[in-house]
Amino acid sequence: MKKILIYLLFLPSLVIAQEYVDLFSIGYGKTFNNSFANTSETTELTTFDANLTLPIPINDKHTFITGTAFSYSNLQLFPNADYSSLYSSTLKIGLASTFNERWSSTIVLLPKIASDYKNISGDDFYFGGYAILKLKKKENLIYRFGFYASSEAFGIFSTPIIGWYYLSPNKRFEMDMSLPIAADINYKLSFATVGVDYYGIGRSYNLNQGTLPKQYVDQSSLEFLGYLQFNTLKNSLLIRAKAGYATSNYEVYEDGDTIDFGLSAFSFGDNRTQLNPDISGGLLLKLEAIYRFNISEEKK
């Protein structure tokens, strides 16, 4: 355990102003009655995701970051069609560096395989990454400035990242913002933690279902959820019950029908022909479990 503590203390990208590191998380969610546009048909959407992050120290200034991320979605892509399963497996390879007491950075490469996992080929492989620069303004406040980019089936997608992390002096109120990708605001009560969070998802999947011409899925989802978090095992195992609204659109296009460039919510040169109806959002219920390493407790 002490060895793990040393690893985490040398991970400035995750530790600055925070007293914990989330090493592993899993989540299971379900939305109901997602309607297809201009039809009376609906589909249910089931999702599962898992995320693992492992820091390995190089020296007191640099830490190698590795890990994996996996996601699964199951839904109907067309009205009255069979349910389709979509998968994404990502490898994390990165470096966290400390320059001085105020400035640090994180650079992570994210190669992935994303498809229906039928007859996997080089067409299922995509490559992305992000870079974050952090400024420690106060002991309980840091700012983030970064950029994310990824190759997708529809072309190149990118977005700037601007955010901050804040922890109140009494350590009850917390804000963790990385906009426009994610946001989390919560307040710790005596028996549990209540909060709201937002997560924006944009990814694509290659389809290998034997259709000609070949097709791909362009997923764009926004999740707005409130949650009740139960802190167990001395705040090391967190269980979150979440509920809210999610826009979960899975657009199907012909392979090769792409955009010129995507920047955040804007698509340039998007003259694609969508093959399936738009899918509306709906009520999302989600259950999450997080393994959190509490640095302050380990120091004690």
Image: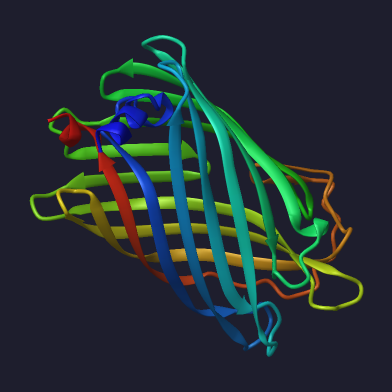
Picture quadrant where residue 26 is located = bottom left
Compared to residue 145, the image places residue 193 above or below, namely below
The image position of residue 102, as x and y in percent, is 39, 12
Q: Position of residue 114 (x, y in %)?
A: 68, 59
Does residue 168 appear left or right of residue 92 in this picture? left
Q: Closest to the observer: 218 or 14?
A: 14
Q: Quadrant of residue 238?
A: bottom left
Identify the residue shown where x is 58% and y is 82%: 43
Q: Position of residue 132 (x, y in %)?
A: 53, 27
Q: Residue at x 66, y 67 (%)?
A: 250
**Location of residue 101 with respect to 91 vertically, above or below:** above
Q: Is residue 44 visible?
A: yes
Residue 255 image point, x, y percent = 86, 63
Q: Is residue 263 visible?
A: no
Viewer-nearest residue: 43 or 134: 134
Single out the residue that lies furthest toward the right. 213
Quadrant in the picture for the C terminus: top left
**Residue 237 as seen in the image, left or right of residue 31:** left
In this view, the residue in front, 224 or 18, is 18
Relative vertical location of residue 107 with respect to residue 281 in this rendering, above or below: above
